[in-house]
Image (spheres, rainbow, N blue to C red):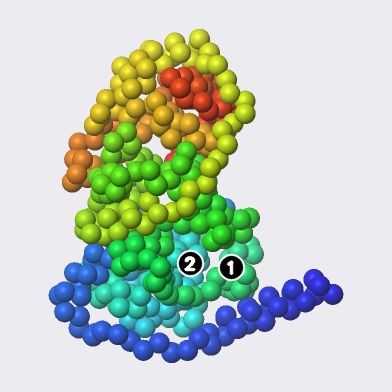
Amino acid sequence: MLLAAVVVALALGAWWLLADTSPTVSAVGSTNPVVAQVERGAYLARAGNCMACHTSQGGEPYAGGRPIETPFGTVYSSNLTPDRSNGIGNWTSVDFWRALHEGRAPGGRLLYPAFPYTSFTQVSQPDADALFAFLRSLQPVAMANRPHAMRWPYDSQLALAAWRTLYFKPMVFQNDPAHDVQWNRGAYLVRGLGHCSACHTSRNLLGAIDERFALAGGTMPMSNWYAPSLLQANEAGLSQWEIADIVRLLGSGQARNASVAGPMAEVVLHGTQYLTQQDLTAMAVYLKSLPQEAMPRDADMVVSSAIGGGIYDDQCAQCHGKQGEGVAGAYPALVGNRAVTMRSTTNLVQIVLHGGFAPATRGNPRPFGMPPYQLVLDDKAVAAVLTHIRSSWGNQAGAVTELEVSRYRSRETP
């Protein structure tokens, strides 16, 4: 009986969602937007890093076609240029608002949450209208949208409707009266357009984010990267950081003893480096205020092996220093580096195998990078040198096993 009740509830929820019974939303703004609104929309598109997903490799900006791999199949980003046949040329500002706020295309078709409307639902309607004005100002590109390649049963609107019944409810960001304007602006950017939870939060078996664990860290599906927790001081928690250092990291990709790599480098390259100091500071204030949770260190501390120490001296010490001290402004210190000592070793293995490259930004136009070692070191050597680094110079983290390295090497290169 309980199972039957659940099935009936899901079916009713699916019917309601597919029936498109939501109330009409009144349009805000003009169909012929002023230059100021278009410029604001361009800025907000940077804040949401929209171009990165909606531009295929070597393709026209915002013309879509970029494949987004998921555990359920491949989603291809859509054409956001004002082309009438392939893009949003026939959309209204209300259509666009509903895509962001409700995850619906014109006509009520449900969108896949690879488009992060679960975060964009918090975007205000005036900001949605500014984004729409900017996108409508672009040159139309007649690039047809590529059909998604999702596996059954995930390729059906009914499955999407059931998923939404369980995991999605439209909302709009509400200011927290317990905090000031600056904190609320930072919360709005991080939770909404910035959609930071999309990476920094773990997902369940159906790809949904549990907001109870928002920003607590998670492995990014299909990418082999781990987005560290922003709630833990030994991962990426920022409660002990200076505001200026957080701003510099978001704005340039580099701060004292820290730099970004992997997917976060793309976020800085295409998005946050273009934000104003006021908005970066607001984000920093919010991120610094997040509650921190202590995480116990691994119990199986290990003594570094002679093999790992020798590899470090031969391959790493020239840049990172004999004692892991690094070089300020060039090569990060490994002593006390949270990216080195945090529980997950995913990113460490990825960087050693595939290299680590910070973005070239206005604040750091010529960043130093780390070359890949996948053709230089075998799995045993990578495990040995990382174990040495994680247990030397006062670092106290668990060993990296050869099996871990082999598992990541065997997967597709990110």
Q: Are marks 1 and 2 in contact (CB under 8 Å)?
A: yes
Q: Residue furthest right?
A: 1
Q: Is residue 161 visible?
A: yes
**Is residue 334 placed above or below 365 in the rendered structure?**
above
Furthest residue toward left = 35
Q: Does residue 111 sit above or below 344 in this rendering?
A: below
Residue 118's disc is: 2
Quick one: SS at disc 2?
helix
Instruction: Look at mark 1 in the image and give the residue it sits on.
Output: 167
Q: Residues within 10 Å of mark 1 (few under 14, many from 20)?
A: some
Task: Tell me if 269 is positioned left or right of 382 in this view.
Answer: left
In the rendered structure, the answer to whether residue 110 lies left or right of residue 368 reads right
Residue under the point 33% across and 55% down: 285
Residue 189, position as x, y percentages in the image: 35, 63
Gap between marks 1 and 2 measured at Cα = 9 Å
Tell me which residue sits at (43%, 19%) in the image. Answer: 393
- The residue at 58%/71% (across/down) is 164
Q: Residue 153 at x, y = what percent?
A: 64, 64
Q: How many marks?
A: 2
Q: Is residue 143 left or right of residue 307?
A: left
In the image, residue 225 sits, relative to residue 28, either above or below, namely above
**Which amino acid, by three-letter code, is at mark 1?**
Tyr
Q: Of marks 1 and 2, which one's residue comes earlier in the chain?
A: 2
